[in-house]
Amino acid sequence: MPETTSNKTKGKLGEQAAAKYLEKQGYKILEKNYRYSRYAEIDIVAKDKDTIVFVEVKTRSNTAFGHPFEAVNSAKITNIFKAGLYYLKNTKENYKKYRIDIISIIGDLQNNNPKIEHLKNISLN
């Protein structure tokens, strides 16, 4: 049980670090942990100029069990896409452009020294 708790804590810290990173890049954070269903949640919904960005954040202490990007499979991307369409349908704004990004965070989040990588415009192809 403690492992799950520390992983949840690590995930939340990773999402906070990703949100700060995006804000420094000029993004506006619109939502955090936007839930579409029991199975689909978007970690961060942000606005990059005129584009809505649905961001999946993966956090790891190290790459011993693989790179964080490897944890995002086609089923996860499909769920983010569905949740994103639901978000677009239910928002008051009329956004024409949207994309899915993944942010990888590796390292020590307690000391604010993580390595952050950002993949933009992920697709199922």
Image: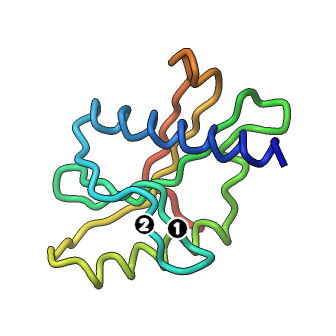
In-front residue for pair 117/31: 31
Residue positioned 54% across, 44% down in the render: 12
Q: Which residue is mark 2?
A: 34
Q: Which residue is mark 1?
A: 41
Q: Decide if residue 75 is on the left or right side of residue 103.
A: right
For label 2, the SS is: strand
Q: Decide if residue 28 is on the left or right side of residue 40.
A: left
Question: As shown in the figure, which amino acid type bears the numbered disc 1?
Answer: Glu
In-front residue for pair 66/35: 35
Q: Which mark is residue 24?
A: none
In-front residue for pair 69/23: 23
Quarter of the image for residue 67 reads top right
Residue 106, given in percent of the width and then of the height, sits at: 64, 29
Q: Decide if residue 62 is on the left or right side of residue 33.
A: right
Residue positioned 55% across, 15% down in the render: 111
Determine the residue located farthest toward the front in the rendered image: 1
Residue positioned 20% across, 71% down in the render: 95
Q: Are marks 2 and 1 in contact (CB under 8 Å)?
A: yes
In-front residue for pair 100/111: 111
Does residue 36 lie above or below 57 as drawn? below
Question: As shown in the figure, which amino acid type bears the numbered disc 2?
Answer: Tyr
Residue 124, given in percent of the width and then of the height, sits at: 59, 68
